[in-house]
Amino acid sequence: MAFISTMALAGPPFATDDPEPVDYKHWEIYVFSEGTHTVGETEGVLPGFEFNYGLLPEVQLSVTAPFAYHRITDEETQSGYGDTELGLKYRFIQEDEKGWRPQVSFYPSIELSTGKVDKDLDEGHQKEFLPLWLQKSYGPWTTFGGGGYWINPGSENKNYWFFGWALTRKITEKVSLGGELFHQTADVIEGTSSSGFNLGGTYDFTENHHVVFSAGRGIGRGSETNQFSYYLAYEFTL
């Protein structure tokens, strides 16, 4: 579930987040589905709801409420409410549009243990993520990324790092496309690190209605834990 947890509090549609908060007193609302498939096993969220609100100037409050599923081949699919996620994004450096300085945010988050452990929808403990995210734009191009430290308690677990970087380009007034690379160190004792990529983008139906999407997989040994993954969401802004 580590990959899914990372995706949910990331910058849709990528695992890598960006530092830009929602404007003060404005909303971003996502209705989404995401999933990861490996040999004989699929797990994900369908549906999930993410609410981002501009609580203060330069400060965004985020809440994610997922309905999770977990399926092992030839066994009954387990489903139910998953882990609630809370985050607070604070942008403390503004981008210099004519210079080199990027915008930078600190985005701590908490993954609450609200899913059912007996259905493999929860690991049975709370997790915290402490990342820094950066972003710089050049005309139609935008690049962003960074990473942080996951506090991951549990008898067989260990704390771990996540890093990612993305590049996107505005193709038309309605379409933006891009991709990302990400890496995660081992999150269990005697575990291995993993890497992966996603390709995706956004389509703007109107100023307030959008579709965001991505798909990808693991790289190298990372493919053992991520043969295929996806993210698809409707986004409403106001």
Image: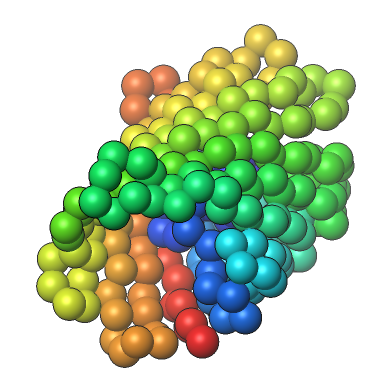
Percent x, y of residue 37: 47, 45
> What residue is at 45 percent from the left and 52 percent from the top?
94
Describe residue 138's horizontal placement relative to residue 182 as left or right: left
Q: Quadrant of residue 29?
A: bottom right
* Residue drawn where x is 43% and y is 48% of the image: 103
**Colour scheme used in the picture?**
rainbow
Relative placement, left or right, of 52 versus 228 is right
**Which residue lies most toward the left here?**
172
Q: Is residue 179 visible to the viewer in this orientation of the structure?
A: no
State the quadrant of the N terminus: top right
From the top left corner, tell me how far across and down residue 109 is, in percent.
Answer: 71, 48
Relative to 164, say whether 68 is above or below: below
Farthest residue, direction top? 190
Q: Is residue 119 left or right of residue 33?
A: right
Q: Looking at this view, is 65 or 53 the one in front?
A: 53
- Where residue 179 appears, x then y in whole percent? 28, 47
Q: Is residue 66 left or right of residue 10?
A: right
How many numbered markers are drawn? Answer: 0
Regarding residue 107, the answer to whether it shows in the image is: yes
Residue drawn at point x = 79 percent, y = 20 percent: 156
Residue 99 location, quadrant: top left
Q: Where residue 143 appears, x then y in whole percent?
A: 30, 46
Q: Residue at x 41, y 58 (%)?
A: 13
